[in-house]
Image (spheres, coloured by chain):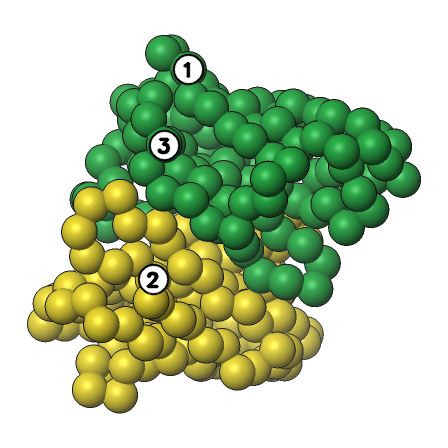
Amino acid sequence: AQKITQTQPGMFVQEKEAVTLDCTYDTSDPSYGLFWYKQPSSGEMIFLIYQGSYDQQNATEGRYSLNFQKARKSANLVISASQLGDSAMYFCAMRGSGGYQKVTFGTGTKLQVIP
Amino acid sequence: DSGVTQTPKHLITATGQRVTLRCSPRSGDLSVYWYQQSLDQGLQFLIQYYNGEERAKGNILERFSAQQFPDLHSELNLSSLELGDSALYFCASSEDPTEGDYGYTFGSGTRLTVV
């Protein structure tokens, strides 16, 4: 079974500062994928970044980077230079190996960017 | 526009009624997933279809059913509705459930309110 844990229900960050959203996971699959999604107040789910368990380097997508520490089973999202538009819910998610694997989501972290 | 189309966007209905939510996957995607997002919970996986066949089942109630048609669109049927079924229902699609650096592509969701 897969489990995603996000321990920060809510966070505040000053505009232009960097922020780290925590995510830990548990799985027995030998290979897996880790994702982060953003859900603004409008409700849609927006894909941000992906990390494969065998990827040697941490994934980066613009201002988003994923701090992947496999031994610690953590996949923290780092947002640099926060913008007001970054205020949203952020979900960490994982897909196990093999075919037809569903993606399991964490409970989310609500990020609020303060001007 | 993500390419995944969900209709209707909003639905208000009474307890005991039955509704059908529709999802058209992104062009080329064979796999469709349904998720339920309640106010106090994260995204709960309901069911997955791949090319017309059910592939994985999650926490889907017996009052709920789904299917994927030959043209790959999917419908989620919710019957004997209860107040607790009020939620945002997401459909997501992917090309190949074993691949994808981007997890799913989500639709904008159907917000169901049971009164």
Horizontal and vertical percent for residue B32? 40, 33
Horizontal and vertical percent for residue B88? 66, 44
Q: Nearer the viewer, mark 2 or mark 1?
A: 1
Q: Which residue is mark 3?
A: B54
Q: Amino acid at mark 3?
A: Glu
- Given the image, what chain letter belongs to the residue carrying mark 2? A
Q: CA distance from mark 1 to mark 3?
A: 11 Å
Return the mark for residue B69.
Answer: 1
Q: Quadrant of the C terminus of chain B?
A: top right
Q: Amino acid at mark 2?
A: Met
Badge 1: residue crowd in 10 Å (few <14, some 14–19, many ≥20): few
**Picture colour for chain B:** green
Return the mark for residue A94.
Answer: 2
Label located before the other in sequence (1 or 3): 3
Horizontal and vertical percent for residue B7? 62, 24
Q: Which chain is yellow?
A: A
Q: Residue at x 45, y 57 (%)?
A: A37
Q: CA distance from mark 2 to mark 3?
A: 21 Å
Q: Nearer the viewer, mark 1 or mark 3?
A: 3
Image position of A3 with respect to B76: above or below: below
Badge 3: residue crowd in 10 Å (few <14, some 14–19, many ≥20): some
Q: Residue at x 21, y 62 (%)?
A: A32
User: Which image quarter: residue B16?
Assistant: top right
Image position of A74 with respect to B53: above or below: below
